[in-house]
Image (spheres, rainbow, N blue to C red):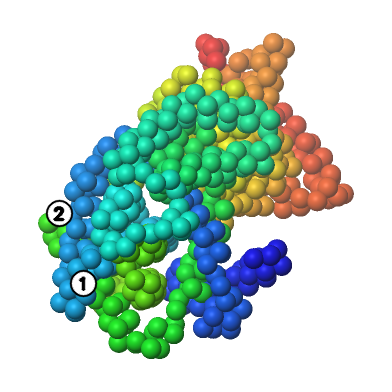
Amino acid sequence: MNSHGILAYTAAFLAAAVVSVPFAKRLGLGSVLGYLIAGAAIGPYGFRIVTDSADILKVSEFGVVMLLFVIGLELNPKRLWDMRAKILGLGPLQVVLSALAVLALLVTWGWEWRPATVAGVGFAMSSTAIVLQILAERGVSGTPAGKDAFSVLLFQDLAVIPLLALLPLLGTTVATGGEASGAAFSPAMKALLAVGVVVALVVASRTVVRPLFRLIAQTRMREMFTATSLLIVVGIALLMEVIGLSMALGTFLAGVVLADSEYRHELESNIDPFKGLLLGLFFTSVGSSMDFSLLAQKPWLVLGGVVLLLVAKGGALLLCARVFKMKREDASLFSVVLSQGGEFAFVLFSAAILAGALTRAQGAELTLIVALSMTTTPFLLMFHDRVVCRASAPKPDADTIDDEHSPVIVAGLGRVGQIAVRLLHAHKVSTTVIDFSPELLDRVRSFGFKAYYGDASQLALLESAGIAHAKVLILAIDDRQAAVRAAQEVRKHYPNVKVIARAFDLIHVYDLRDVGVTDIERETFDSAVGLGERALVALGHHPYQARRAGRLYKRYDLALVERLYKIRVMNQEYISTSAEARAEMTRLFENDEVALSTGLEKGWDG
């Protein structure tokens, strides 16, 4: 494909997505279905703008790889260990029951057992991209159903490697030529390689990656940090492909070993835009690659296959939910969100064709069935909400929020942020701290504070740090414009989060007020008043008079700020109002001194 063709295809994909996705979202169908519709519209069975999307599909599959890397960043070995019962219990049970159910139905339908087994295993896979996006959009990731669904998805992703290794055992022919990708290793060798890669990733993350990020962070060049993040993902994916292992699993493991790094949130915010774009391109490519001629030639076969997948897999999922004693409402949501086929089914079917376990005709039919099953999930969820539950999906309770989501996020760990964090920690309030100075973070982390590197004015970084679960955001950033941008984004997208901001001066106060922040502390205000109080005492005023004068000044000044904010523009009215206020404050202090001169307690020592 030449550069002109790539640009034309890219423009076609983006234009179709821009039109279809907002329309699908408005109808409540979700963004994934919008991308699939966009792909079908521009594909060979739509407007024929794209007639060969195989190359773009290969590139867009990298979106799934990035998705697994981000998932890994949100986990750590401790959380994985805590989830082991569901990952190693519920996950295998779901895959085995779903595969057996499909296998039995296909054999009854007349399929030979080898391709039926491949179809069963492929149909057992669910779409990680679809399910995680739906859980996030509906706000149910923290519910029992959301956590159980994630455990199953994680096991499915981990199971891809052994399943691919076992496919040649089901083949009736031997793949030749250059079609197979990766080095030719035996299953035992692949297992050893997988263990070696995990060990290498752990060692490299400690000895190479973190020092490298520290060095890059010192340059203060955001584009270099983004380039380094992409280099890590692409490099690991390339290494896994060369040795014949799963790119997605490799990047997932890399994310896990970097999950406790202070650069985790910055990594996630850098990767997230590319991940979202490539995932959208992936689903658009899937939609454009659907062979609708098969649907026209064999409508009952294809539609029957979709029904078979949904019924067999849904029944298996409900049985799993019963075995693990899920609540009824959790079981129904769990079975619906995992009912579709997944992107790894495309990988398995392609490998099965190369191994001779499927014919190309069977592979095309199964691929179309899986792609069509992806389009059913939004409709099944609508049915679930309106008929099964007769209510919207449940929201997570406060006690279901993961421990790493602190109630307070502190942006900026300079002289102001440090004091706020210490006060909160003294009251046993956990905080997530974000700062742009690697040296400062190293020093603070040595005292046991949870601190991460990143630009807190980026909404993506705040989201990855848990702003959706936080109650308070303290803005103590040294960059006044960055603080205003962060406040504006949080007030717009997360209005329930209380924003408390440090301001440099009155102009900064006004800028923060303009974006909806009302809890503002001027960084030098209290200390300046304190200096004035000490000066009064040094000049002979009683300490009580000085302290009272300071409190009176604070109240009057705050009221004056409100009056001046309504004027805002530095004009004659603003200047005259300020002058009047100064004169009024002088009279106020004179009257207060007269009132206190007779009743002051001589024994008050301040």
Residue 162 at what x, y percent from top left? 29, 49
Question: Secondary structure beneath disc 1?
Answer: loop
Question: What is the quadrant of residue 17 in the picture?
Answer: bottom right
Residue 504 at what x, y percent from top left? 69, 35
- Name the side, left or right, on which 529 lies relative to 88: right
Q: Which residue is mark 1?
A: 112
Question: What is the quadrant of residue 376 in the picture?
Answer: bottom left
Q: Is residue 486 above or below residue 225?
A: below
Q: Residues within 10 Å of mark 2 (few under 14, many from 20)?
A: some
Question: In the rendered structure, which amino acid carries the disc numbered 2?
Answer: Phe
Residue 567 at what x, y percent from top left? 76, 52
Question: In the rendered structure, which amino acid carries the disc numbered 1?
Answer: Glu
Q: Is residue 141 above or below residue 373?
A: above
229 vs 60, nearest the viewer: 60
Picture disc at residue 335: none
Q: Which residue is mark 2?
A: 324
Q: Is residue 561 above or below residue 144?
A: above
| Residue 204 in view (yes/no) | yes
Looking at the image, how many numbered discs can be counted on the residues?
2
Which residue is painted at 53% across and 50% down in the image? 272
Q: Quadrant of the C terminus?
A: top right
208 vs 530, nearest the viewer: 208
Q: Residues within 10 Å of mark 1 (few under 14, many from 20)?
A: few
233 vs 219, nearest the viewer: 233
183 vs 466, nearest the viewer: 183
Which residue is painted at 53% across and 41% down in the image? 235
